[in-house]
């Protein structure tokens, strides 16, 4: 017990004892001990009731009452209650200030923020940007079903996915279809979800400008390059023996530039496409073409193995899938020293299928793997240039595979070789049309 309270307690007990002792003395003097003691005791009880009433009044009072000044247990209790109340008020004020600051911050965010009640899917709160980006009106839309209010956005379908809802990356705003939004659902508690919408119109416009610029530059470069290339082809090195090495280098470089422009145009075309034709991709002829291309590039410097074990075909774009596979095969040949082996294998994988290109080449250090499919990303610039690479091959592969909902896996060990595997889902697998074709295994060049 703290010292203050103990002394107050003793003081009150002392007063009680004193009053009772005085009552006894007065009682003895007047010869009426018990009535006087009873009156004194009743007085003490009445006084305590009066103090108790004061404490209760303080607890229920709306306005602030100053604490009692004297000593004794009731005054001590009064002071403790006063202190407790003051602390509680300060804490409440601080919490309210904090809440207001958070609300002001959320309200001032340039992104639209909507708090949605999870079970009823109704709007609980939203900030200013939600009015301009999503068209929500205050106060009419508080409590409104979010799916109805944000039509034509496919909200109900999206909200049903809950925690697994993928962000909507490029959705038209319900206010203005030219306003492009990036929508995310953040389930931040069991009861509430946060819907965040960001205006990405400017970013998408810039991205479109970048794409158009690259496509236009590539297109404009194509014609002068064809002319230069054509004239270079016409020059006969035998007529100018001194120029022969220079002519050869010029031809090599103009070819590289032409390939670069072609790859850039391919990438621009792929980026502009949302889907590709859904053709039957006959894998037996595809593998035969890949083998021919690998052999032509290798010039008998490598062993080429093709294993066709799947017995199925694929659904997708013949042209683009050929371009992706052929990029992987050409990389395998270019980054494998003489004497190495390139194995192209097409096999089933569960209900899906996998095409893998394995080489016994230089390999790729694991630190480079996360960025290897970026444009112009090279592990070794000199080796890539030497081998005639543009730095765009794997970028093209990635884009083609995205358009086929396929996944690229890369396993590699430096000095041992690499395996690039393309995994196709069951929806991309089709029965082989000409089942009479033999299944080819281990065809070695
Ligand atoms: P490049 O035209 O330079 O080959 P890519 O986009 O096709 O461009 O490949 C990017 C880089 O990845 C290459 O520069 C090379 O360093 C590395 N790479 C790709 N395939 C292989 C492979 N099979 N073995 C080793 N390195 C590879």
Image (cartoon, grey):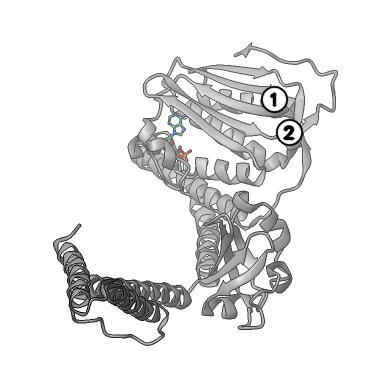
Question: Mark 1 to mark 2: distance in Å?
Answer: 8 Å
- Dot 2 lies on which element? helix
Q: Position of residue 233 (x, y in %)?
A: 51, 44
**Within the image, what quadrant is residue 186 found in?**
bottom right
In depth, the one of 149 and 204 nearer the eye is 149
Placement of the N terminus among the 4 image quadrants: bottom left
Residue at horizontal 53 percent and vertical 76 percent from the top: 127
**Within the image, what quadrant is residue 56 found in?**
bottom left
Query: Which mark identifies residue 426?
Result: 2
**Residue 289 visible (yes or no):** no
Residue at horizontal 41 percent and vertical 26 percent from the top: 363
Q: Which residue is mark 1?
A: 350
**Within the image, what quadrant is residue 387 found in?**
top left
User: Circles 1 and 2: CB distance less than 8 Å?
Assistant: yes
Is ligand 1 within 8 Å of the beta carbon of the residue shown at mark 1?
no
Q: Residue furthest bottom?
A: 63
Residue at horizontal 37 percent and vertical 71 percent from the top: 95
Question: For this view, does 386 lie left or right of residue 289?
Answer: left
- For the image shown, how many numbered marks are present on the structure? 2
The numbered mark, 1 or 2, whose residue comes first in the sequence reads 1
In depth, the one of 141 and 341 nearer the eye is 141
Q: Position of residue 237 (x, y in %)?
A: 43, 39
Q: Position of residue 44 (x, y in %)?
A: 29, 75
Q: Position of residue 223 (x, y in %)?
A: 55, 58
């Amino acid at each position: 017990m703290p010292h203050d309270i103990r002394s107050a307690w003793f003081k009150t007990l002392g007063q009680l004892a004193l009053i009772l002792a005085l009552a006894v003395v007065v009682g003895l003097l007047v010869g009426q001990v018990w009535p006087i003691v009873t009156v004194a005791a009743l007085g003490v009880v009445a006084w305590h009731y009066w103090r108790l009433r004061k404490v209760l009044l303080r607890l229920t009072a709306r306005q602030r009452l100053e604490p009692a000044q004297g000593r004794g247990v009731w005054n001590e209790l009064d002071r403790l209650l006063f202190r407790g109340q003051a602390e509680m008020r300060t804490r409440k004020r601080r919490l309210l200030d904090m809440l207001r600051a958070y609300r002001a911050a959320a309200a001032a965010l340039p992104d639209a923020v909507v708090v949605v009640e999870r079970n009823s899917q109704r709007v609980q709160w939203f900030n200013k940007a939600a009015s301009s980006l999503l068209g929500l009106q205050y106060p009419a839309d508080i409590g409104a079903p979010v799916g109805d209010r944000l039509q034509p956005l496919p909200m109900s379908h999206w909200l049903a996915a809950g925690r697994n809802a993928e962000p909507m990356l490029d959705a038209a705003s319900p206010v203005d279809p030219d306003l492009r939004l990036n929508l995310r659902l953040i389930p931040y508690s069991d009861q509430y979800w946060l819907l965040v919408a960001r205006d990405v119109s400017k970013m998408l416009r810039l991205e479109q400008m970048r794409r158009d610029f690259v496509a236009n530059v590539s297109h404009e470069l194509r014609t002068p390059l064809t002319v230069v290339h054509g004239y270079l082809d016409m020059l006969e090195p035998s007529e100018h023996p001194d120029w022969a090495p220079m002519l050869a280098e010029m031809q090599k470089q103009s070819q590289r530039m032409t390939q670069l422009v072609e790859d850039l145009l391919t990438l621009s075309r792929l980026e502009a496409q949302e889907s590709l034709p859904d053709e039957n991709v006959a894998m037996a002829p595809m593998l035969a073409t890949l083998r021919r291309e690998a052999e032509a590039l290798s010039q008998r410097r490598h062993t080429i193995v093709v294993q066709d074990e799947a017995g199925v075909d694929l659904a997708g774009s013949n042209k683009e899938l050929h371009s992706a596979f052929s990029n992987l095969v050409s990389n395998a040949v270019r980054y494998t020293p003489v004497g190495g082996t390139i194995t192209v294998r097409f096999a089933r994988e569960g209900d899906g299928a996998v095409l893998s290109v394995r080489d016994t080449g230089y390999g790729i250090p694991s630190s480079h793997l996360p960025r290897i499919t970026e444009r112009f990303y090279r592990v070794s610039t000199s080796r890539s240039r030497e081998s005639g690479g543009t730095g765009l091959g794997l970028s093209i592969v990635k884009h083609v595979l995205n358009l086929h909902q396929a996944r690229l896996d890369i396993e590699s060990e430096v000095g041992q070789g690499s395996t690039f595997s393309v995994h196709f889902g069951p929806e991309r697998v089709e029965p082989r049309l000409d089942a009479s074709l033999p299944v080819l295994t281990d065809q070695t060049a």
